[in-house]
Structure formats: structure tokens, C-alpha cells
Image (cartoon, rainbow, N blue to C red):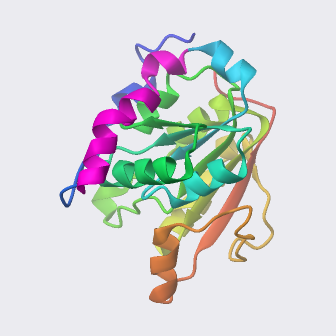
């Protein structure tokens, strides 16, 4: 396991609300009774055998859990880790897990960056970052998930030729993604696979989220990136 004391991901501050409206009774019951059984802890993340014995995909900021639960339903042979600090979203996902009797989802209810810092290198096959908070004000750009440090960190935990899918309906965030992945350092780590990022992938392969549906209702076009992890690594 790498030395984490000075790891850049440990210095990141988690922004945003942890809860909005009160949870429904069923969601509260599931938080109290189901969540503990499927919580993906930092110590579990350090279990190399877990990643060696299982194919693992991770979704960062799963929102209401629509995409994550559908992927888990369609791929029962895959182990999924969902990261989401927002308790209303966690409650929504737990309801879907309970309804569909899903047994292949782990949940981490805290900062995904801290979790990533505990995961061994080359452990994940896929990572999803779908419609993240765009933090549109310039003074908040540092809060955006995609930064040079996180690009290097995702590359570290992805297997060679692993895939990082990113989607956004925010024009400024789309341009931000391009600018961050077009640096020489990032271009040595990832290659964008989709010729037309504005062409909607088939829903069977890339299920919709409620945020994408909201964007459609107001006429916003979404971009869908697929970055392939190159085998060369600049991460030590």
C-alpha cells in the first residue's frame, strides 16, 4: 500500500450539502438497517484480494442511483462501488437495491477522493462520473472533481485500458473537461474514445440519470466522454 500521509487526495475538502429534504420513512429504515451491511469502508478499500478476485466498477457521485442500480442489475457478475455523500441520494439508491434485491453494490457515503487514495493501483475496470456539480462560479473552480490531481489518481486505480466515463450538460464544464484532459500530462494518461461526444450512447450500455432527464426537459444538450487509460503512467 502506498504512503498516504502526503497524498494529494487527503488534502481535498468535501463541499456541498449532506442532506436536503427529510428522508422518507422507508429510506430512513434502510439507512439504519441495510447501509451498514453494504458500506464500503476505507479499510475494505485496502483489501487487494477483493480487487483481484472481482471485476470492480465505481461510480463517483451517483446522485439518485438510477445509473448505478441499472448497471448492477444488467451486470450481476460485476462488483460496484457507489460513492455519494448526499444522504437523500443514498436513501434513493438503497430503495432501488432493496426493490431489485441487488447483491453486487457497495456504498461509500463520504468523499470519493479519500476512498480513491486507499484503493490499490490498477484495481478498477471502469469509473463513472456523471453530471457532477459544475461549480459554475470561477472562484469555485477548485471544487470541481476533475483536476490534474484527480486525473492522475483515477489513472492510478484503473487497470490498463480501463475506462473513465464522464457526462455533463453544462457547457462550461464541458470546456473544462477538454482543457484538463488536453494537458501534456493528461494526454499521456488517457485517450478520448468517442468521435462525437454529443451523440447519446445506447441506454442499455449507458443508462440515463435523473439529471440527464432534467437537462433534456429544458433543452440542454449533454456530452458523453469515454477516456481510455493508457498503459504509460506518470504516477509514482
Q: Residue furthest left?
A: 22
Verify whether residue 126 appears in magenta: no
Above or below 188: residue 49: above
Q: Residue at x 65, y 51 (%)?
A: 73
Q: How many marks?
A: 0
5 displayed left or right of 212: left
Spot occupied by residue 131 in the image (x, y as percentages of width and height):
49, 63
91 or 136, nearer to the observer: 91
- Find residue 194 and report its image quarter: bottom right
104 displayed left or right of 15: right
Spot occupied by residue 88 in the image (x, y as percentages of width and height):
30, 54
- In the image, which residues are magenta? 24-46
- Find residue 161 and report its image quarter: top right
- Find residue 64 and report its image quarter: bottom left
Above or below 201: residue 115: above
Where does the C terminus fall, quadrant-wise?
Answer: top right
Q: Residue at x 45, y 79 (%)?
A: 214
154 or 37, nearer to the observer: 37
1 displayed left or right of 133: right
Spot occupied by residue 83 in the image (x, y as percentages of width and height):
46, 41
Q: Residue at x 57, y 44 (%)?
A: 102
Verify whether residue 30 appears in magenta: yes
Q: Of helix, strand and loop, which mostly describes the magenta segment?
A: helix
Q: Residue at x 50, y 48 (%)?
A: 97
166 displayed left or right of 28: right
Spot occupied by residue 184 in the image (x, y as percentages of width and height):
69, 45
Where does the N terminus fall, quadrant-wise?
Answer: top right
Q: Is residue 141 visible?
A: yes
Above or below 47: residue 30: below
Q: Is residue 14 visible?
A: no
Amino acid at each position: 500500500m502506498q504512503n498516504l500521509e502526503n497524498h494529494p487526495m487527503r488534502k481535498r475538502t468535501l463541499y456541498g450539502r449532506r442532506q436536503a429534504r427529510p428522508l422518507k420513512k422507508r429510506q430512513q429504515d434502510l439507512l439504519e438497517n441495510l447501509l451498514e451491511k453494504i458500506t464500503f469502508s476505507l479499510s475494505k478499500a485496502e483489501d487487494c484480494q477483493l480487487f483481484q478476485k472481482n471485476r470492480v466498477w465505481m461510480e463517483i457521485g451517483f446522485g439518485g442511483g438510477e445509473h448505478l442500480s441499472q448497471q448492477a442489475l444488467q451486470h450481476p457478475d460485476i462488483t460496484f462501488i457507489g460513492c455519494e455523500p448526499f444522504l437523500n441520494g443514498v436513501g434513493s439508491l438503497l430503495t432501488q437495491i432493496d426493490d431489485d434485491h441487488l447483491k453486487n453494490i457497495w456504498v461509500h457515503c463520504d468523499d470519493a477522493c479519500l476512498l480513491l487514495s486507499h484503493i490499490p493501483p490498477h484495481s478498477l475496470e471502469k469509473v463513472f462520473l456523471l453530471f457532477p456539480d459544475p461549480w459554475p462560479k470561477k472562484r469555485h473552480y477548485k471544487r470541481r472533481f476533475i483536476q490534474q490531481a484527480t486525473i492522475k489518481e483515477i489513472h492510478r486505480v484503473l487497470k490498463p485500458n480501463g475506462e473513465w466515463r464522464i457526462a455533463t450538460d453544462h457547457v462550461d464544464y464541458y470546456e473544462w473537461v477538454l482543457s484538463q484532459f488536453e494537458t501534456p500530462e493528461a494526454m499521456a494518461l488517457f485517450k478520448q474514445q468517442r468521435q462525437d461526444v454529443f451523440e447519446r450512447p445506447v441506454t442499455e450500455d449507458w443508462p440515463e440519470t435523473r439529471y440527464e432527464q432534467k437537462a433534456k426537459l429544458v433543452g440542454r444538450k449533454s456530452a458523453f466522454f469515454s477516456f481510455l487509460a493508457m498503459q504509460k503512467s506518470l504516477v509514482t
